[in-house]
Image: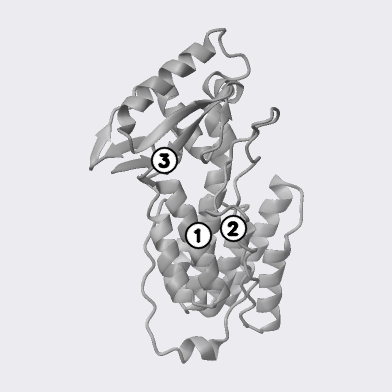
Amino acid sequence: MLEFRILGPVELWSDNSELPLNGKKQRTMLAALLLADEQVLPDYRLGEVLWGKNPPDTYQAQIYTYASRLRHHLDGQAEIVRKGAGYLLRAVSGRFDYREFQALCAASRTALRERNFREATRVLQEALALWRGPTLTDVTEQLMETAGPGIEEARMEALENRISADLALGGHEELTPELVALVGTHPLRERLRAQLMVALYMSNRQADAFAAYHAGQRHLQEELGVDPGPALRHAYQAILTGEPEAVWHEPADLPAHPRGYGTPLSVRRGPTAVPDQLTIPGRLVVRAPRQESRLGAGTRFGKARRCYP
């Protein structure tokens, strides 16, 4: 079975053996076709992600060569099709890690809407475990700049949703060290900081929770010149008023796309344009659950699996 992997270095595997992808441009073309989601990726767009705004005069011939080399690895389980002035990759069978990730995220949103937090945690741990490191680090700079931020945002959304589910299960003490590290890495990400505040408050560290808020306020003012947004203000008010109720905002409805994942590749012109951006799951905002509910749960929270990073 073929396995297409982009959640880390771009790789192609067959029956547990990695197939050789020679050169950055061949890996870029494979990743770009996968991210186009079985829609036609025009030659000009492939030229842009392979060479930038000024591809060589022979770029179409070179793209043809890269497509031919990739076809040798597909062995009937997928096909690269020339259609009009572009190419598409049609997977007959096989696995694509990003597709699996998005399907698991869709399942987790269903679980969260149903308040099935244990199932949401389990599914999101499985989704996040698909990551093998930073995404698309071995493709061209053009593809990385176009597709990388949307994919990374999807990962962060999944991570934040997993933390929200874990907080609802009463895992605040186990989560606090992880959240401290994440906020240190992403100091401007307000939802993570709000989750840290809730975890600290639930661990009887009210002063530390307020300190986390004010540190975030300073970061936002110094780096962006803005005030805290709704997530931080919500958490601050919950702690300030001593009303640690769980207030869950359901994720946005699942996207219309039948597989629940989109393409972060933008196409700005032409009749074969693909969608502009990755469909990203909706956000959850959490305030600390009631103390009596977490004390009376009668179950011990299992330590969450760590994932990159």
Per the model, the C-alpha gap separating discs 2 and 3 is 25 Å
The crowding category of the residue bearing disc 3, from other C-alpha atoms within 10 Å (few below 14, some 14 to 19, many at least 20), is: some
Per the model, the C-alpha gap separating discs 3 and 1 is 21 Å
Asked which quadrant contains residue 229, the reply is: bottom right
Residue closest to the eye, 61 or 199 = 61
**Residue 74, placed above or below residue 113:** above
Q: How is the image coloured?
A: one colour
Identify the residue position indicated by label 3 in the image.
91
Amino acid on which disc 1 is placed: Cys
Residue closest to the eye, 1 or 238 = 1
Whether label 2 touches label 1, CB < 8 Å: yes
- Depth check, mark 2 against mark 3: the one in front is 3
The crowding category of the residue bearing disc 1, from other C-alpha atoms within 10 Å (few below 14, some 14 to 19, many at least 20), is: many
- Residue drawn at x 63%, y 43% is 277
Q: Which label number is shown at residue 281?
A: 2
Q: Position of residue 305 (x, y in %)?
A: 36, 63
Amino acid on which disc 2 is placed: Pro
**Residue 127 located left or right of residue 227:** left
**Residue 109 located left or right of residue 299:** right
Identify the residue position indicated by label 1 in the image.
105
